Amino acid sequence: MAGVIEMTARRRPPSPLLAGMRDRAPGLVGALVGGAVAAGLGLASFAVLVMMLWITSPYPDSGPGGALHTAAALWLLAHGAELVRTDTLAGVPAPVGIPPLLLLALPVWLLHRAARDATGGGAVDGDDGTDDGFGEGVGVVEGIARVVAPPLVSARTAWTGVVLGYLAVAAPAALYTAGGVLRPSWVWTGVCVPLVAVVGAGAGVWSAYGRPDGPLRRLLGVLPVGARPLVLGPDGRPGVALRAAAAGAAVLLGGGALLVAVSLVGHGAAAQAALLRLTEGWSGRFAVLLLCAALVPNAAVWGAAYALGPGFALGAGHVVSPLSSAPAPFLPPFPLLAAVPETGEGRLVHWAAAGVVPVAAGVVVGWVVGKGAASGERGGTRPGGGRDAVWPPGRTARAAALAAVLCAVVLAGLAALAGGPLGVAVLARFGPVWWQVGAATLAWLVLVAIPTAVTVRAWRCREPQTDGPRIGRQREEPAEGARKSRRLRKGSRPGRSWFTHTGIAGVAGGDASPADRDTKPRMSPPAPDAPYTSYAPFDHDALRGLQGQQDATTFEPYDFLPADPAPEPSQKPDTP
């Protein structure tokens, strides 16, 4: 630890409201208050939005109480809870179970922020820390030792307090929602809301402690020992397989969103007609556009499912896929549903557009894995590693297969969240089937990513076809120019000239004497104490006995560079 400067990391200052509450009630009570404030802020955000739309609506069907009931129902729906609509035309309650995935970001962010502020310690500015667990630690980054101060509240206390405080507000909100038109399903509410609270608060506490890799390694204990470094690297950063899976999921979701956008542009007239038919006032159209924006992540998942092959359901028994499109005949008008292909068999353009997305995802996954396999565990070859750091083809294939499995799990989970029922009978199933999406993702990536990863690894590990160095190797035979210079050009005559081509390494001249043509160039041995030189010494005797000619051969410039002059011979050569 010599030459290391110790520096105490300052904590990020929490928000003034939470800071004042924690000063009055530190510990568990402060965490409880933070969780309750996070839930209250989420409810207030939805209430403000719904009340604004209700005020501007030209046809308010209910009073402020109905608007507040709707806001609380949307807040529960954002957590993934299923709602039940009671005022249907048939009089039969209809479930509403498609949660807009964009709305989920608000409660997760509020929980993350509340848990991080309730903990009150950790690394500077929430950056990556070097601690192995939740506690004190010293991290060394670029020659600076960072002493992480102990947090004010322990991780378990902060996490428990935030979760309990959040649920303490969610339970009355669910009871209040039960008196409105959209009533919560108690089973889904009892599962989804606590799950979101647990995950969001846990992420906040983990971030407050500098994102240590100890909890992640304990979670990875279910994996084989050889697969764990592929998911989480030795330095706590994502491994090669995890990075490749994330890249593949991003390509699939991005490609799905692109397919939806292109289809919406192609069916722009139908989408506009659906918007105008659904509502007449500008406030209602604004509300429909906000709902479409909140459903954009859902549409990206549906597009990815369409590109992978299984497609998605638009009603029970009605599947839309690249092979065929059979949506339900009486669907409600909605702008995003206008992007669905026409009823009938799929055409070549549908097959091509859908097939490009999973192939591109497989190529990206294979490229990331192959690049990591050719350069070792991390993004570059470690000093001194050389070729020993290169993975064998078997490990490269296993890493690509693991990345395919992780990407399939992610897509299956998103498919399960992006769909749900919108009613009974025909409307009981909307969206992709999660296990079909996961199986299709695994099949595509295994078929494409593994060969791509092995090929990229072999390409990056190929031997470079380069010539040896020209400088630093002592020549023992006459150079090419010396052999070619013996052939005089037509019209040339022997004699001295201002510029002569290279004859022997370190000798300027043309042709040597006939007696010296079959002998190797004479080189004086170096002195015992002289340093080793990697090129031939200069020979003064050969300079006087050679005659210069000019020819068309190419000469090497470095042959003109002499070494240190060798000792002068004891006898001078005879003058001709």
Image (tube, rainbow, N blue to C red):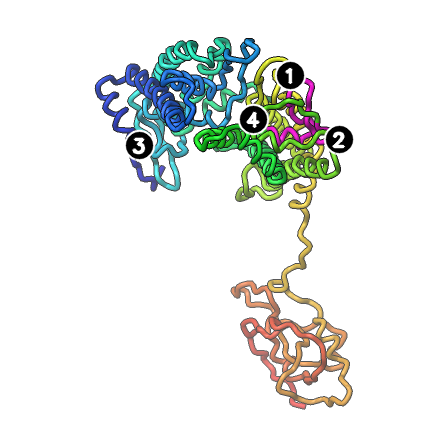
For marks 1 and 3, the one nearer the N-term is 3
**Mark 4 neighbour class, 10 Å CA radius: few under 14, some 14 to 19, many 20 or more:** some
**Mark 3 neighbour class, 10 Å CA radius: few under 14, some 14 to 19, many 20 or more:** some
For marks 4 and 3, the one nearer the N-term is 3
**Mark 2 neighbour class, 10 Å CA radius: few under 14, some 14 to 19, many 20 or more:** some
Residue 573 locus on image (x, y percent):
64, 84
Please tell me which residue is depicted at 58% across the width and 29% down the height of the picture. Answer: 301
Instruction: Tell me which amino acid carries mark 2.
Output: Glu
Instruction: Tell me which amino acid carries mark 4.
Output: Arg
Q: Which residue is mark 4?
A: 228
Q: Which residue is mark 3?
A: 12
| Direction from residue 501 to residue 166 in the image, left or right | left
Dividing the image into 4 quarters, which one contains the N terminus? top left
Q: Which residue is mark 1?
A: 426
Instruction: Tell me which amino acid carries mark 1.
Output: Val
Q: How many marks?
A: 4
For marks 4 and 2, the one nearer the N-term is 4
- 3D distance between C-alphas at marks 1 and 3: 53 Å
